[in-house]
Amino acid sequence: MFSFLSTFLIAVALAMDAFSVSMTKGFTQKDLTNSQILYYGLFFGGFQALMPILGYFCGNIIASIVTSLAPIVGFVLLLIIGVNMIRESLSESEEVNDYFSFKEVTLLAVATSIDAFAVGITIALLNDPILISSFIIGVVAFAFSIAGIFIGKKLGDYVGDKFQILGGVILILIGVKILLGF
């Protein structure tokens, strides 16, 4: 039986990685425009909404394969992006790479939404309505992503440019968390 509260709490749990990554991008990318911030929200929210639908329809056949590979894929993507942020911050160049990249936004959105695939399988097993559940999951991820960027921007204003190192470390730690299943 569908429960809005249960679905909302699952959505909040799924959105935590997107929130953390968005906060990191907020304090490392100083010149994000409102439209770029909106893209982060749309990508994170969109992938969080899409993955349960994919999980719902793929079912048990693909579930065991994807579920076992998902933590590894999420970890590798976040590790690559995090190491790159740290490397850029420590480079001899004074210029920090804080440009907006659709490729990076897409990789981050995929990496933080893979666990939502397994939630889609669970939704199918419970016979809950997938479209309502996915909509709630997507909206919560969208809102958390936007909030994360604005909170990150405020933190970045206080701490300064070397926060990019911390941002890279946070992304790597989120990847480790995904890998270890916390």
Image: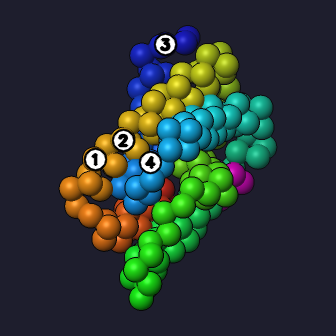
| Dot 2 amino acid type | Phe
Q: Secondary structure at mark 3?
A: loop
Magenta-span inclusion, residue 27: no
Q: Relative to the observer, which residue lies in front, 162 or 75? A: 162
Residue 54 visible in the displayed image: yes
Q: CA distance from mark 4 to mark 1?
A: 13 Å
Q: CA distance from mark 3 to mark 1?
A: 35 Å
**Residue at the spot x=77%, y=32% of the render?**
57
* Residue range corresponding to the magenta coloring: 65-69
Q: Residues within 10 Å of mark 2 (few under 14, many from 20)?
A: some
Q: Are marks 2 and 3 in contact (CB under 8 Å)?
A: no
Q: Relative to the observer, which residue lies in front, 172 or 102? A: 102
Q: CA distance from mark 4 to mark 2?
A: 9 Å
Judged by depth in the image, the label closer to the viewer, 2 or 3, is 2
Of labels 3 and 1, earlier in sequence is: 3
Of labels 3 and 4, earlier in sequence is: 3
| Dot 4 amino acid type | Ser
Q: Residues within 10 Å of mark 3 (few under 14, many from 20)?
A: few
Judged by depth in the image, the label closer to the viewer, 3 or 4, is 4
Of labels 2 and 3, earlier in sequence is: 3
Q: CA distance from mark 3 to mark 4?
A: 28 Å
Of labels 4 and 1, earlier in sequence is: 4
Q: Are marks 2 and 1 in contact (CB under 8 Å)?
A: yes
Q: Secondary structure at mark 2?
A: helix
Of labels 4 and 2, earlier in sequence is: 4
Q: Which residue is mark 1?
A: 154
